[in-house]
Amino acid sequence: QRLPRILDELLSYRADVLCLQEVDRQTFTKLLQPALTHFGYQGMFTCKQAEGASEGCAMFWNLKLFGRIEEEKLGQYGYAIRDLVPIRNDQRSNRDEWEPCQLILDLLQNRSDVSETLKLLGHVVQLVPLRLNGTDQTIVVGNTHLFFHPNASHIRVIQALAIARQAERVVGDYNGAFVMCGDLNSGLMNAGGELLSKRSVTRNSKRLQVDLNNYRYDGKHEELLPTVKGENDKASSAVDNWNDFPALTIPQSFPTLVSALPKYPPVTHFVPNFVGTLDHILMDSATFELVRSAPMPTLEDLNQDTGMPSSKLPSDHVSVVADLRLSG
């Protein structure tokens, strides 16, 4: 019963662009794609790049507003985030301008445990250039779902940096405006959300040092190493070298992203034992302005049920909906 209700909700928004996460491949091919194609959308699906994975990110755009993309070209707009992570020197990057990539490269070359974790994760990002019909204007829309584990904030920051780096390339290639959507598995004041919206994270910000030195993942099992108190009462672990997470600042060449919502929502994910704001629309503040946004439920609204999905909300995440207008 959930899937028809989700489809009904999606159609009710009459959106120009739909960005979806945790979409099963069969749900995309057998329900969403045929149904939304009937209503004038084109879409693409990017599956997680992990053994046995069948879910990923999906994006649909309204062909009344945006040009059709040749089907054989769609695949080039979906990326495995691990392939974008700076784990080696990359001649395409300007080392001076993208200093944070060099800092992460240095960290990963000295922390094989973190590098191996990133290689095992199959998360993806879509960066799709959508051309407005009858114009030469392009809007690059990003859609992603970052790593979920609450003790892996360092992984989400590295994933967010890799996405920003590639997004700048795509935006530059098309001279386009930029909108980033997705489940960042963080708010905008920590981890990946903070890096994208505030342009920087400070050295060992919040939980970054603790998570860097205590979270382990081998593809099948997760482990949290015992945390002890170190110098200046900072959390540290048995790792003696490279146990600091560096300060990162995204260069000014990357668009300045702000939340597309006028008020920070109190919750977008509500399940037993967890309540948080994980889902966001971030817009380029230089090229977009907010027209209006859909109302978000309050905690009081959601507390009428034990969690999501519920009788009123068919997904386990609240839809984030905004009308944006190109400025200028």
Image (cartoon, helix red, strand yellow):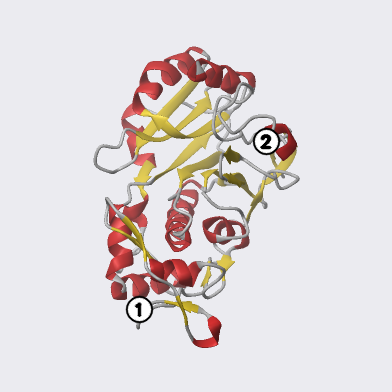
Residue identified by numbered label 2? 322
Q: Which mark is residue 177?
A: none
Instruction: Name which residue lies at 36% across and 45% down.
Output: 79
Q: How many marks?
A: 2
Q: Secondary structure at mark 2?
A: strand
Q: Amino acid at mark 1?
A: Ala
Residue 110 location, x and y as percent?
30, 76
Instruction: Name which residue lies at 46% across and 59% down.
Output: 151
Mark 1 burial class by Cα count in 10 Å: few <14, some 14-19, many 20+: few
Q: Amino acid at mark 2?
A: Ala
Mark 2 burial class by Cα count in 10 Å: few <14, some 14-19, many 20+: some
Residue 215 location, x and y as percent?
38, 63
Instruction: Name which residue lies at 42% across and 54% down.
Output: 166
Q: Quadrant of residue 44?
A: top left
Residue identified by numbered label 1? 238
195 to the left or right of 296 = left
**203 relative to 263, above or below:** below
Residue 118 location, x and y as percent?
33, 58
| Distance between mark 2 and mark 1 Cα atoms | 46 Å
Q: Quadrant of residue 266?
A: top right
Q: Is residue 94 visible?
A: no
